Structure formats: structure tokens, C-alpha cells
Image: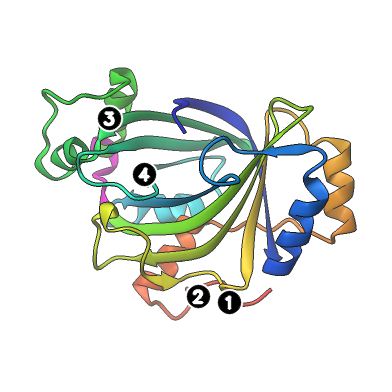
Amino acid sequence: MSKEIFSRYEVKYLIPFDKYQRLVEAMMPYMRFDKFGNEGRYNIVSLYFDSPDYKIYYETRNKLRFRQKLRLRVYDNVTVNDTSFLEVKQKFNNVVNKRRTSIKLNDAYKYIYEGEKENLQASNFQTLREIDNFKTLYNLQPEVVVSYDRQAFHGLFEDDLRVTFDYNLMCRSDDLRIENGPQGTNFVDPNLVILEVKVNNSVPLWLARMLSEFECSRQSVSKFCTSIDLMTGEEEKKAVSQF
């Protein structure tokens, strides 16, 4: 979880929970558990930002060729004295780039809510400057907290292959303190799992065949947009509720 620069393709699928369990069993000869968590399982809680006029939401929803998001993320149980990650996620021509810096959660809050920029103990000040420019340009403010459980795997024979399964997907806007952990309203049916295949170049043949055999259909699911849909309560914006 400490890597600070990512560049890769990400392909998403929405699958039933029982298919996730069967797919994991089938993948194990080719993959290993992520080194973090118990058998690659851990919890993620992220605070997402947007402008007052929802520029980030609409850029993402309208699938602009270049779009980006800002989020503050923690893993598993933390306090304000533990490490968090401020990161920018960008997408251009289907390639995902992420840059992040680790920062004590309390310092992150001071930066976000008080504008504090001095005496911050960040791991990458260049990334922090980029984040600050992005935040200022868009007038970004804390908007919604998204949380979920994840089980992650890495390829045994393909160094660049990573596969993740996300479930128990919840969001909230009434409590934006991410150290308060996973809680909120399900924005994806609890019986569904978001599968993501992450590679630098192309999906290996064995995995492509396996996904076809398990009848996994590609489906774009934006955790951020779907959460905003649910929290804003607009009639035309609905949470994912069926397969």
C-alpha cells in the first residue's frame, strides 16, 4: 500500500458474490494473496472531493478523455495519528495514473480544513504540490466517504497483474471523518462484487479465458459517481441494485 506512483489499465466487472468465491478458487494456481491483510483482505475508507458545482462528478460521469479525482484514503482501523494517503487518480485514454503521498491523518485534516501547508510530514512534497494545485483550481471540498472490503491478488507469473474484489460497498456524507471507519448506506447491492483487473499492458490469456468461462461481463462502475448519485438523492441518479 506504500507505492506512490501507478500507471496501468484497469478493467472492471460486476459479479455475484458466489461467482467471486468460485473465481478466486479457480485463479489460485496463477495468483498469490496480496501481502497486506489476512489472505489479501483489508478494508478501505476514502474521502472523495468535488467542487460546489460537481465538476469532478460530471467529468467522470460524461467519461471525458482526461479526468481526475482527489481522495484521502486509509486502510483498516486507524486514528488521527496514523498514516493516511492523499492521492490524485487520473485517467487518460483508458490508462489510469495515480500519484499519492503518505501523510499523518491529522496533518491531512489540517491541510484540508485549515489550509495548513507548513510543517506537514508528507512523504512526497512534489505530489502534495500537485494535489494543492488541483484542489485550488477546482475549489475542491470534502464531499463523500466511500468504504468497502477488498481481497487482492498478484500474478505469480505476471509481475504487473493485480486482481481485486471489492464488496460491502457503502457511502455516507453526514460523517466525513474517515477514522470512524466503514459505515453508511450500500450503494451497490451487498450480493454483488466489483472485480477489477489491473495490468500494465494486456490481460493474460489464461485470465481472459477464465473470465469468459465464468461469464464475467465488463461493466463500468464508478464508486465515486454512484455514491454521489445516492447521496444527492436525485431521482435520475440511482444506486446499482441489480445484476
- Of the numbered discs 4 and 2, the one sitting upstream in the chain is 4
Residue kind at label 1, given as amino acid type: Ser
Numbered label attached to residue 135: none
Q: Position of residue 217 (x, y in %)?
A: 77, 59
- Of the numbered discs 2 and 3, the one sitting upstream in the chain is 3
Disc 1 designates what residue?
Answer: 241
Label 4–label 1 contact, CB within 8 A: no
Q: Position of residue 202 (x, y in %)?
A: 77, 33
Label 1–label 2 contact, CB within 8 A: yes
Label 4: element kind: strand
Q: Nearer the viewer, mark 4 or mark 2?
A: 4
The question of residue 137 being in magenta is answered with yes
Q: Position of residue 121 (x, y in %)?
A: 21, 24
Residue kind at label 4, given as amino acid type: Arg
Mark 1: give few (<14), some (14-19) or many (20+) Cα within 10 Å: few
> Disc 2 versus disc 3: distance between alpha carbons?
32 Å
Label 3: element kind: helix
- Position of 217 relative to 65 (above/below): below
The magenta segment is 136-142
Residue kind at label 2, given as amino acid type: Lys
> Disc 4 versus disc 2: distance between alpha carbons?
25 Å
- Of the numbered discs 1 and 3, the one sitting upstream in the chain is 3
In the image, taking residue 232 as reference, residue 221 lies left or right, namely right
Q: How many marks?
A: 4
Q: Nearer the viewer, mark 1 or mark 2?
A: 1
